[in-house]
Amino acid sequence: MVEAANILDVKGLEAWYGESHILHGVDFSVRRGEVVTLLGRNGAGKTTTLKSIMGMVGKRKGSVTYEGTETVGLSSDRIARLGIAICPEERGIFASLDVRENLMLPPKIMAGGLDVDAILELFPNLRERMASQGTKLSGGEQQMLAIGRILRTGAKLLMLDEPTEGLAPVIIEQIGLTIKKLKDRGFTILLVEQNFRFASTVADRYYVMEHGQIIDTFANSELEANMEKLHAYLGV
Amino acid sequence: MFNISTQALFAQLLVGLINGSFYALLSLGLAVIFGLLNIINFAHGALFMMGAFCAYFLLTYAGIGYWGALALSPIIVGAFGIFLERTMLHRLANLDHLYGLLLTFGLALIIQGVFQNFFGSSGLPYAIPPQLTGAQNLGFMFLPNYRAWVVVFSIVVCFATWFAIEKTQLGALLRAATENPALVRAFGINVPRMITLTYGFGVGLAALAGVLAAPINQVRPLMGENLIIVVFAVVVIGGMGSILGSILTGFALGIVEGMTKYFYPEASNTVVFVIMAIVLMVKPNGLFGRAS
């Protein structure tokens, strides 16, 4: 059987936080093994899109299919068990857990995850910090831990929400290299970024969001040609 | 006043340790429940009483003695707790603490009222198991075997609970879900089920304490009512949600209370509340609490 090209299809996705209507019909898709980046200004709905795919918002409408399975209507623990994992913007490192406990916390949901040695090979800085309290790590180390812990689970689609935010250039470079290595290992990555200079080093394709909708899309090879438009979209 | 008789001193110390055992077991359950459910479980005293009654029923109607009750009563009352959580408490998940407190307070009144209706206010006798009757002469005092058992067993249960929460993978999930339930759920954990089982576990601890108390206090519908007020003071002193804090504070305050009974009996009923007031002024998050 030939696997479908798209691992994730989002169609007409709407989402609400309480009374506020944040997403107004988001349409995009992610192909197997791709790195896709959502670009957009603050408040455009990028984080909400990731959280909606994960089932972490109050109310959703529309369609999100992962490997052909409709996930709107499923709880986030069920969605996770299909093979999607999230690394949230605030990183979500648990203060009452040490680094090892944080790393081992997400349960294995299917085969194909990295073992701890492979994760520590990607992020050698974590090796000496295993017994430290999770939140005692530097921002960069916390980001590595937040990415590292979802690699163990066997999830095939990784959603990374602004992994470079507030980090030093040398750390950003390391995270870029890691994303490339993960892509080589066959992971599919959906990235949210404000920093398109960073995104351009890893992404295959871009979607641009504004006011809770996708307003444009282009491949990495078309980045130069779209630079002017992109500056206008992002207001930089 | 300071005419120290060692025998009386050690007797009060023992009473303090016994009370401390109950404070520790109950405040531990409250701390676990508060941590994950954000509910101040005012029904805890009534559930403690149900544990004792369950032991009484098991003996009277099924011929199951103390040791069987020690295992079965926490399971039966814990299952009742799970029923309460599934049918009522989980609906309050996203509301202010106050709603959970009011609901569980109402439940406590109803449960205690029902038992009072059928059993009055006087105590029903529950015998010390034959293996634990008698006492040891320690030279400076007589130590009743049953009381020694209660103290040792409580310490073991408290330590086992602390170990399970602080040192195991399951405990790590519990701690993580206490901090950020939405994210733990997004990792594939069925957090609502975990919350239900945690409430059942906390209630089971209360029922276990009830069985331990049955041979000491008799089995009375209101046996949990006074106890729970002191236990809440213990929780405030130790710090809401701190596991180790609730255990240590429970035992320590039991001992402080016992010592006060010896040195200045008039203050023995208030000393815990005086300490609570001082702690609230100096460290509002409690001695072991994390600043929120």
Image (spheres, grey):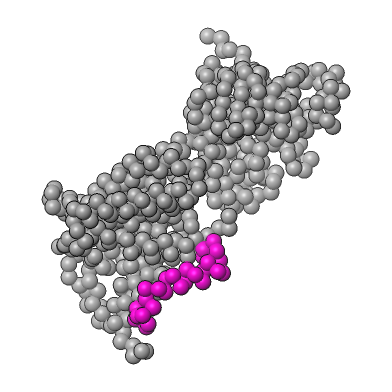
Query: Would you say residue A142 sits in the magenta stretch?
Result: no
Whether residue A140 is visible:
yes
In the image, residue A56 lies at what x, y percent? 56, 33
Where are the magenta residues, as a range?
A: B261-287
Q: Is residue B124 above or below residue B253?
A: above
What's the residue at 22%, 51% (across, down)? B54
Q: Is residue B96 above or below residue B156?
A: above
The quarter of the image holding the C terminus of chain B is: bottom right
In the shown orientation, is residue A32 left or right of residue A227?
left
Q: Is residue A62 above or below residue B251?
A: above
In the shown orientation, is residue B208 left or right of residue B63?
right
Q: Is residue B97 above or below residue A114?
A: below
In the image, residue A197 lies at what x, y percent? 80, 30
Query: Would you say residue B273 sits in the magenta stretch?
Result: yes
What's the residue at 42%, 71% (across, down)? B272
In the image, residue B49 lies at what x, y percent? 27, 56
Whether residue A182 is visible:
no
User: Looking at the image, which residue sits at the far right?
Assistant: A228
